[in-house]
């Protein structure tokens, strides 16, 4: 299986490193020629819960030099999805499957603006990884990785991908309810990410104080109602408990949104709380979205 992974961030490098080490034909694709050359020269270093790994693999900014692959894995920030896939469209050929395991809601729609929707399969992962530097990754936690057809059901192509990825070191499960899986992860992110970014705290702090806990519960409750409007029913008590348990289990973690905020970068708020607010009546999520956007745009003023 020939795989092209778009995005040299934490998850892209984690997938690329383990899958290459596991024997698959993997190329990492970046938009920066300079960074691609550096990563090709130095390789990818992964340290953490599976020990230390140093993996050399092809890295390029020229997708045309790679040509069509069997599987494209999109691992960029949600707001770069369409642009990145359009830039590297040469990876997609007649039999190519395009798969996203990104955060948030809306990545499928962004990819469908570039490639035929029937090439796209859904996905989700809860693997935990942090980028320490270019090509340097800390694998912080194991998790579940899922793949499935967007419209439900099972197919030979997703079964084959799951088998190959699992054998190469990324345990992957086929689900016929992939939209439910995506929403389940989204709701967890809705409860944690924006609040950690606004308050500048690690995940576990949210459940230690009543005001932040109440905001978490309100945002999650809205997301559950909006999901129901999309035809996906969740037991609210169970999912509230799950969000709190994730916050406790990852108590020392800085969420990806907090990391982006501290770095003065753009966050994925529009694809998390913002997505919930777009799809239904969700004033708490809208307020959290507006606050994060305001913090993004006033970062420079706070530095003075």
Image (cartoon, rainbow, N blue to C red):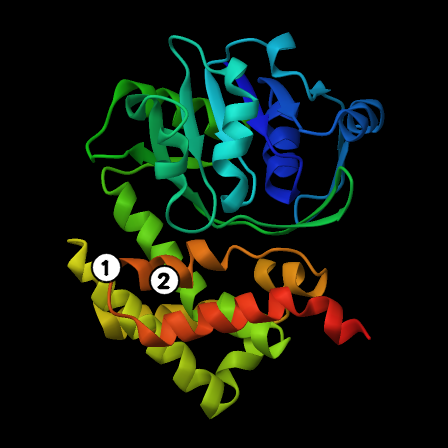
Q: Left or right? Give the position of 283 relative to 59.
A: left
Q: Position of residue 5 (x, y in %)?
A: 57, 27
Judging by the rendered image, the residue that carries numbered circle 1 is: 227
Q: Position of residue 165 (x, y in %)?
A: 48, 27
Circle 2 sits in a helix, a strand or a loop, which is it?
helix
Quarter-of-image position of residue 184: bottom left
Circle 1 sits in a helix, a strand or a loop, which is it?
helix
Which of the marked residues, 1 or 2, is nearer the chain's N terminus?
A: 2
Residue pictured at 44% horizontal, 10% vertical: 93
Quarter holding the C terminus?
bottom right
Q: Is residue 94 above or below residue 128?
A: above
Residue pictured at 47% horizontal, 34% vertical: 82
Q: Position of residue 146 (x, y in %)?
A: 38, 40
Binning the other alpha carbons within 10 Å of mark 2 as few (below 14), some (14 to 19) or many (20 upward) gives: many
Binning the other alpha carbons within 10 Å of mark 1 as few (below 14), some (14 to 19) or many (20 upward) gives: many
Residue 187, numbered circle: 2
Quarter-of-image position of residue 300: bottom right
Residue pictured at 74% horizontal, 75% vertical: 302
The residue lying toward the viewer, choosing from 91 and 45, is 91
Q: Is residue 45 above or below residue 131?
A: above
Q: CA distance from mark 1 to mark 2?
A: 9 Å
Q: Position of residue 31 (x, y in %)?
A: 67, 29
Residue pictured at 54% horizontal, 49% vertical: 142
């Amino acid at each position: 299986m020939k795989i092209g992974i778009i995005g040299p961030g934490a998850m892209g490098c984690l997938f690329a490193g383990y899958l290459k080490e596991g024997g698959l034909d993997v190329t990492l694709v970046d938009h920066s020629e300079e960074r691609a050359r550096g990563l090709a020269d130095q390789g990818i270093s992964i340290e953490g819960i599976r020990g230390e790994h140093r993996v050399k693999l092809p890295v390029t900014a020229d997708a045309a030099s790679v040509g069509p692959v069997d599987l494209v894995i999109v691992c960029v920030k949600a707001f770069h999805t369409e642009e990145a896939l359009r830039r590297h469209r040469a990876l997609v050929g007649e039999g190519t499957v395009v798969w996203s395991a990104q955060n948030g809601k809306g990545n499928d729609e962004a990819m469908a603006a570039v490639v035929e929707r029937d090439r796209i399969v859904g996905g989700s992962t809860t693997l935990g990884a942090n980028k320490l530097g270019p090509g340097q990754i800390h694998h912080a936690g194991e998790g579940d990785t899922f793949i499935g057809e967007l419209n439900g059901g099972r197919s030979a192509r997703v079964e084959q991908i799951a088998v190959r990825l699992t054998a190469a070191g990324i345990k992957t499960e086929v689900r016929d309810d992939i939209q439910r899986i995506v929403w389940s992860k989204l709701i967890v992110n809705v409860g944690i990410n924006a609040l950690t970014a606004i308050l500048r705290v690690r995940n576990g702090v949210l459940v230690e104080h009543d005001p932040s806990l109440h905001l978490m519960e309100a945002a999650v409750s809205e997301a559950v109602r909006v999901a129901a409007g999309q035809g996906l029913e969740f037991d609210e008590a169970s999912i509230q408990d799950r969000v709190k348990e994730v916050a406790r289990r990852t108590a020392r973690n800085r969420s990806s949104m907090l990391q982006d905020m501290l770095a003065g970068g753009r966050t994925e708020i529009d694809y998390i709380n913002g997505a919930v607010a777009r799809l239904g009546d969700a004033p708490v999520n809208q307020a959290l979205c507006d606050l994060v956007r305001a913090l993004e745009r006033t970062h420079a003023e706070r530095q003075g």
